Amino acid sequence: MTPQEAPGVVHVLYAHVHDAPHLPWLCSPQEHQRAAERAETDGEAASLATAGLLREAVAMLTGIPPGSADIGHWCRVCRTVGDHGRPVAFGPSGLTMRGVYLSAARAGEIAAVAASSQAPVGLDIVKPKLHIEFDTSILTHAEASDLAAADSLERSTVWNKAVMRKMAVGKATGFGGAIVPASLDTLGGVLRSWPPSIEEEVSGGVQLVDVKGLPEGYLGALAYLGARRPIIVVSRTSNAV
């Protein structure tokens, strides 16, 4: 197998937001300020844990210290760097770091990030609730039929996997919530249809993978924009500074 044929590797790092005291120490003053300003909506601890995990992920891919990079967010729709959109890493020179693809997600008490050096990635996680109402308007006809046919005990899992896969594709392509969910058919973990707006991003292939190894009670889905299914390595961040 040649290097070009080898599957990509995606690292998924996660942390319990109240049990990773070293992560806030990795964050910049600007990240602390943003976390404080958005404490009521996002939770200050969760925001800092996510920011710290992104820095750890960049260090893992590049070998530079976590504090040597800066993390911004690029919105594919607005075409600006700001406080929303796909995470991007900037090196000490202030330029975007090549070969660093990032995504972040939070659910319950868990923050998680995905990082790859080969292709864009999108990560979504969820802590399923026992009793939820299913909004089938965000599903395709095939996905809605699959949900209706599922056993009552499995219906929540089927629903959450469909939603996570759509979210993951939105994150990987950079279009996020600008994509109408019902325009994405992810039945069976395969991207079967998509809107014309993301044709360029998905033309090289999209791999949808269930993320195994998260804490009990959590589900995860990852979208990888590549022709081959990636190897996913899941690990919990160390509590050491």
Image: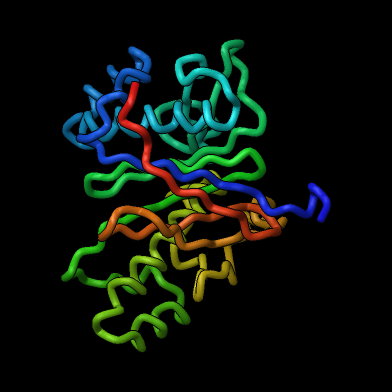
Query: Which residue appears at 44% of the width and 31% of the height?
Result: 54
State the image coordinates of residue 114 (x, y, percent, origin top left).
Answer: 48, 43
Q: Quadrant of the N terminus?
A: bottom right
Query: Which residue appears at 32% of the width and 45% of the height?
Result: 106
Q: Quadrant of the C terminus?
A: top left
Kindly indicate the quadrant of the structure image that contains residue 46: top left
State the image coordinates of residue 23 (x, y, percent, origin top left).
Answer: 32, 26
Q: Which residue is most to the right?
A: 2
Q: Is residue 118 left or right of residue 76?
A: right
Q: Does residue 198 sit above or below 128 in this rendering?
A: above
Q: Is residue 149 left or right of residue 97?
A: left
State the image coordinates of residue 71 (x, y, percent, origin top left).
Answer: 47, 24
Please tell me how many numbered marks the rendered image carries.
0
Kindly indicate the quadrant of the structure image that contains residue 167: bottom left
Q: Does residue 37 sit above or below 79 in this rendering?
A: above
Q: Is residue 120 left or right of residue 46?
A: right
State the image coordinates of residue 127 (x, y, percent, origin top left).
Answer: 26, 57
Query: Which residue appears at 51% of the width and 70% of the height?
Result: 189
Here the colouring is rainbow
